[in-house]
Image (cartoon, helix red, strand yellow):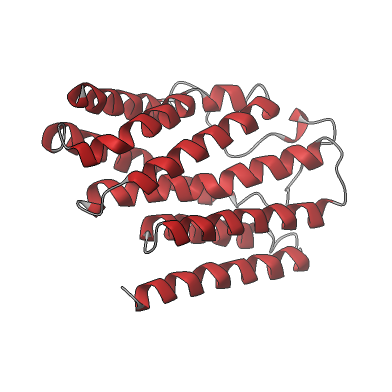
C-alpha cells in the first residue's frame, strides 16, 4: 500500500504541474470576474512573484520521484502522502476552476492549504531537501495565496474599505504563517515562501503607491524575519 501511495503522489504531482500547460494559466483573478472589478488589489503580489510556482512544481515532482525510488516503503514518508495527494489533486483542477469561479476557487485553495500544511507537519526531519523543503515552499505560498484570494473575493463582492480589508487578510496570513512556524520550527522552505510573497506584495504597492499597505507588509516581513532568526539561533 505504501508503494501505491508513493505512485499516487508522483502522478498527482505531475498532474498538478501540467495544469498550467493545459489551461490559460493564472496570475491572479481578472477584474471582470467580480461585481466590483478588482484592478490592482492591494494584497495581490506582483506578477513576477507567481514564478515561484515553477520551483514548487519541479521540486514536488523531484520529491515524489525520490520518494517512489528511495522511500516507497518508509512509514515516515508515507504519513505525508494522503494529505499531499488530496492537496495536489485539488490543485490540478484549481486553475480551470479559478478562471470560471472565484468563489469556488477560494474554497478549493483553502482545502489545498489545509492539506498541504498537514503534510508539512507530518514530514520527518530526515531528507529535508527531498521532502520538507518542497512541502514548505508549497504550503508557505498557499498560506499567502489563500488569504489573497479571500481578500480579493471579499472586496470584489462589495466589502469596503478596500485597503483595511486587505491589511486584515495580510495579517491573517501572518498569524497563520507564524502558527505553522511555531508548530514546525525552522521550516526554511515555508518561511522563504512567505517572505517571497510579502516581497511581491511590497512591489505591487509601490506603483501605484499605497503607503498603508507598504507599512503593514513591511511589519509583516519583520515579524516573519524575526521569527525565522530566533528559530535559527536556537537550532
**27 shown above or below 44:** above
Which residue is at 68% across, 29% downward?
102
Q: Which residue lies furthest to the left in this view?
A: 70
Which residue is at 24% across, 53% downward?
129
Percent coordinates x, y for residue 201 in the rendering: 62, 57
Mark count: 0
The reply to whether residue 86 is in sight is: yes
Q: Is residue 177 left or right of residue 22?
A: right
Q: Which of the 4 quarters of the picture holds residue 174?
A: bottom right
Q: Residue furthest bottom?
A: 233
Q: Which of the 4 quarters of the picture holds residue 78?
A: top left
Percent coordinates x, y for residue 77 in the rendering: 24, 39
Percent coordinates x, y for residue 71 in the rendering: 15, 37
Percent coordinates x, y for residue 185 in the rendering: 39, 62
| Quadrant showing the C terminus | bottom left
Which residue is at 87% across, 52% downward?
161
> Which residue is at the front of the view, 98 or 76?
76
> Which residue is at the front of the view, 226 or 54?
226
| Quadrant showing the N terminus | top left
The reply to whether residue 62 is in sight is: no
**73 shown above or below 229:** above
Which residue is at 23% across, 47% downward?
130
Amino acid at each position: 500500500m505504501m508503494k501505491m501511495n508513493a505512485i499516487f503522489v508522483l502522478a498527482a504531482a505531475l498532474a498538478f504541474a501540467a495544469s498550467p500547460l493545459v489551461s490559460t494559466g493564472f496570475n491572479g483573478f481578472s477584474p471582470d470576474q467580480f461585481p466590483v472589478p478588482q484592478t490592482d488589489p492591494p494584497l495581490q503580489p506582483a506578477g513576477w512573484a507567481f514564478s515561484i510556482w515553477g520551483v514548487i512544481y519541479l521540486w514536488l515532482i523531484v520529491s515524489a520521484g525520490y520518494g517512489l525510488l528511495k522511500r516507497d516503503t518508509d512509514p515516515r514518508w508515507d504519513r505525508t502522502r494522503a494529505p499531499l495527494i488530496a492537496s495536489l489533486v485539488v490543485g490540478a483542477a484549481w486553475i480551470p476552476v479559478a478562471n470560471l469561479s472565484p468563489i469556488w476557487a477560494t474554497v478549493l485553495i483553502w482545502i489545498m492549504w489545509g492539506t498541504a500544511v498537514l503534510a508539512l507537519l507530518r514530514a520527518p526531519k530526515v531528507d529535508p531537501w527531498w521532502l520538507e523543503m518542497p512541502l514548505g515552499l508549497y504550503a508557505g505560498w498557499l498560506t499567502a495565496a489563500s488569504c489573497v484570494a479571500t481578500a480579493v473575493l471579499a472586496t470584489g463582492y462589495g466589502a469596503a474599505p478596500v485597503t483595511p480589508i486587505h491589511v486584515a487578510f495580510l495579517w491573517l496570513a501572518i498569524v497563520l504563517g507564524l502558527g505553522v512556524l511555531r508548530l514546525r520550527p525552522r521550516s526554511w522552505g515555508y518561511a522563504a515562501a512567505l517572505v517571497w510573497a510579502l516581497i511581491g506584495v511590497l512591489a505591487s504597492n509601490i506603483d501605484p503607491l499605497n503607503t498603508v499597505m507598504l507599512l503593514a507588509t513591511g511589519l509583516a516581513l519583520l515579524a516573519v524575519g524575526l521569527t525565522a532568526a530566533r528559530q535559527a539561533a536556537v537550532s
